[in-house]
Structures are given as structure tokens and as C-alpha cells.
Image (cartoon, rainbow, N blue to C red):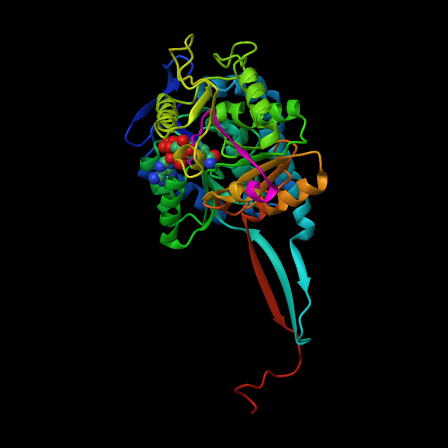
Amino acid sequence: MHSRLFIDGEWIAAANGAMFDVINPANEEVFHQVAAGAASDINAAVKAARRAFDEGPWPRMNGVQRAKILNKIADTIEQQTQQLARLEVLDNGKPLPEAVWDMEDSAGCFRFFAGLAQKSDNEAEEQIALDDPGFKTTVVKEPVGVAAAIIPWNYPLLMAAWKVAPALAAGCCMVLKPSELTPLTALELADICHSAGLPKGVLNVVTGLGPDAGQPLSEHCDIDKIAFTGSVPTGSKVMAAAANNIKNISLELGGKSPFVIFADADIEKAVEWVMFGIFWNQGEVCSATSRVLVERALYEPFLARIAEEAKKITIGNGLDEGVLLGPLVSKGQQEKVLAAIKRGLDDGARILTGGGVPAQHQNGCFVEPTIFTDMNEDSWIWQEEIFGPVVCIKPFDSESEAIKMANNSRFGLAAAVMCADDERAQRVARAFKAGIVWINCSQPTFAEAPWGGYKQSGIGRELGRWGFENYRETKQITTYISEKPWGWYLGR
Ligand code: NDP
């Protein structure tokens, strides 16, 4: 396990020598310490990335050359999947099979952007038609410059991959700041990238606390682009800091995503996908479908069936066989989720199952799978992101009512619909005010498809060719090709 900052190809201590504890949320034991980077370390990292961008080979390589290294990074992640996944479980708490899946997705993300890098060579220059034959215009794509990536703790390596892979594919150099709660796999990624042949200074990783390392990074005037995933309040601070020097910005913020289930849906499939949409990754998922709307005729049978299944979920240490729900990432997150549950009860909602710390898991940061019903549409638990295994379920009577309730949110990250009538499903999907919509499922995510939200869920899209464009500038080069003098001042 690494414990130092990775700057300009070297492992170094924080300038002030500070360290912070890394805690296993399954038992609250400190198992490691990592350097607590601050403003001077951020300066050093940005300086290294700037030098690598202005003078180094990476932005000057073609896409085929960059793809070779990105594919090597993907190969290594695949080879080290088991070790990396175990590290992720120690840091984050998630069940091992989920962490293995994250590692595979991270490798897939590097491979996908390697493919785009390779393809981009042939698309780098485009002639565009003009209405004046005296001119010729070529549009070229270039890397945006030095990028900063600030990532959360819910998918530590995968969130790093979503930003590092497209940024590197585009030819950017960068500084990555992981969450203080889960710094370990980002440091491993630095090692993997370096071993794969990434030139020094291209990827720098500074671990540290949000206000001490994240804030100076988002304020830094030598950063051209900032990509952030996390909460709305922090996203708003990052946006304000980015205004300093008008940084190009993409934000992936929270959600309170609806899942609309019509009465003709298969109840077993509905229960399975609703559970996957909220209990997978302990509900610590920005796109978790945490507001479920069930058509009245199916409402009571659905409640009975999901409560029965939620009680059966095996809770425990993510490294133990058969566990499907691990601890939340930290004591602080557990307290936040328990406070949200109390607030729901205080506001008059009813708990169908769960609602506390599991009796057999009093140590560690566990919360039971929790199902709320009977809440008001304007209540706090129906409207606010909880980021834990807590789902709120309400009935509806008509399609138009379901759409209105689904869209009644300040967020707009994701939404899902399940019904037997495909025409209706397509109609509802188009009526959702959300950037990601699932039909007859919830959560599956692909590196090829755009990811991001409407409203306060963010700005811009990650993944796919949309994510790649985040890290590229568009330049027009216009040449005067006519033999005719321009004749504005001279020769009148
Ligand atoms: P934050 O938004 O605070 O953290 C996300 C990242 O931003 C972390 O790397 C964090 O560092 C960093 N950060 C914190 N403060 C600053 C700052 N002033 N300037 C720049 N970067 C900063 O999320 P939390 O970890 O506090 O989680 C709080 C809530 O956010 C969750 O309960 C959940 O509701 C939501 N959330 C949403 C996520 C999503 O995917 N949309 C992901 C994670 C959380 P550090 O961790 O070191 O403080």
C-alpha cells in the first residue's frame, strides 16, 4: 500500500510532513496512513503537470501511441483485479464481488478510451464548408491542457478511471485528488500508469483533505479544466473556485432518482431491480433509484414482497463470502444516514423494514436496508439525497401523476420505468427530466454511453464520446485563399 504523494513521477511526503488515518469501515480500525497534501503540494503537482503538458511528449503523441499505454494500464488493472478489489473493500467497505466488478469496469473504461484515442487521429481535422469560397476553414481538436479531477469515495478506482482515462486519451496532463476516505486505489493507479510507461508529470496524485487539497486545486490558475464528482454543496464551491480563471468545468453531483413501476410489471423483476437500484453499493450511488413510485393496484403486494426480500439481505464485512451489504464508508456517513432516518420518522413517515444498526453488527459503520412509506411528497426524506440503503416508496394513480411526481425534484441525474407496455415505457422515458433513463432495469452503466444530469445534478456528460470531448478544445483555422486583395483599407 502506498502512503506518499505521486508528483512528477516520484513518491514524496507531504511538504509539511502531515499524514491522515485510513480506516476500515467494517471494524473502524485504522489500518494505514497516507500523506495529507496541502496547497504547496498541489502547487508542485500542478507545476509538474503544466511542464509535462507544455514541454513533454504526451500531448504531442498521436492517439495510437497514447492508446498503447492506456491499453497497458487496462491490462495491469485486469491482472491485479483481485488485489485492487480487496484494497477497495478495506477502504470503502463494499462487498468483494462488487469491488471486483468495479475493477473490471475500470479496466474497460481505459480500454474504451484507448479505442477513442486511436480513432481520434483520423478525426482530428475536419474541413468545413463555408459560404465564401475565398476562405478555407479547418477545425482541429486539441487537448484542453492541465486537468484536475476531484473524486468521491463511493467508487474510488472507477471514478478515477472515468476522469483519468478520457483525459489521458485526449492528451491532457493532470492532477487527481481522491477522497480522504478512500485514497488507496488512486495511488495504485499512479503506480500502474507509471509502470505502463506514462511519462513523468502526466498523472500526479495528491491525497489530502477536501478544504486543504481539493480547494487549492480547484482555485489554481494553472488548471485549465476541472472535473468533479460529489455533493451539490461541494460542487458549488468548486464551481465558484473555477470561476477564478474561467476553467472549463464538468460536475457530476447528487440525485434523488425516481423509479416508476406500472401495475402490469412483473412483480419479481420489479422487486429485484428496485433492490439493485438502492441496496447495491449500500445505496452510496449518485444514481440510486431512491424514490419508488408504484401504481396503486400493485402497491400493497409490492410492499409486502420487497420487505420480505430486504430482510433476507446478508449484511457483513465485504470480504466475507455471501455478503450483499457492507458497511457505509465511514462513521460520519453512518451518522448522516441514521439522522436522515430519524428525520423521516419525525416527519411522520412509516418504516416498513430496517431503520437502524443491525443487531449483530454494532461495530463498524453498518445500516440496515431500510424501506419508508407514507411520507409526504414535500418531505425531506422524499426530496433529499440520503446516500445510504434507504428507499422511499409511494403509490400513484395515473401515468401523468407518476411523471409529475418523478420530475418534482431539484435533481435530475437518473430515472427508471418498468412496465409491460413498451410504448408507454418509451413515452415515460422521454418525459423524465433526467440525463440517464433505464427501462425495465436500474443502474447498469456503460463506458460507451453518456453519463450526467439535468438540473442540480450537474453540468456536462462523462463517458462515451461526450466524456472524451470534455478534455478537448475545438479550434478553427481559417485561411484566406483568394488571390483577390481584401481591399478594405488599401486600394479603395
Ligand atoms: P464531497 O462532495 O464533500 O466530496 C467529494 C470530493 O470533493 C472529495 O474528494 C472531497 O475531499 C472533495 N472536497 C471536499 N471539500 C472540497 C472543497 N472545498 N473543494 C474541493 N474539493 C473538496 O462529498 P462527501 O464525501 O462529503 O459526501 C457528502 C455527500 O455527498 C454524500 O452523503 C452524498 O450525498 C454526496 N455524494 C455524492 C456523490 C456522487 O457520486 N454524486 C459521491 C459522494 C458523495 P474529501 O473527501 O477529502 O473531503
**Image quadrant, ligand 1:** top left
Q: Is residue 189 visible?
A: yes
- Residue 213, how many percent across, how many down? 35, 36
Is residue 205 in sight in this rendering?
A: no
Q: Is residue 477 above or below residue 96?
A: below
Point 67% across, 74% down: residue: 131
Q: Is residue 395 left or right of residue 4?
A: right
Residue farthest along the left direction in this orientation: 16
Residue at image coords 45%, 24%: 184
Relative image position of residue 477 (x, y in whole percent)? 59, 64
Indicate yes or no whether the magenta region holds residue 393. Answer: yes
Magenta range is: 384-402
Q: Quadrant of the C terminus?
A: bottom right
Q: Nearer the viewer, residue 302 or 117?
A: 302
In the image, residue 292 lies in the stretch drawn in magenta: no
- The foreground one among 226 and 322 is 322
Side (left or right) of 116 relative to 188: right
Where residue 267 appears, as percent x and y from the top left, is 64, 24
Tell me the quarter of the image containing the N terminus.
Answer: top left
Given residues 463 and 267, the one toward you in this image is 267
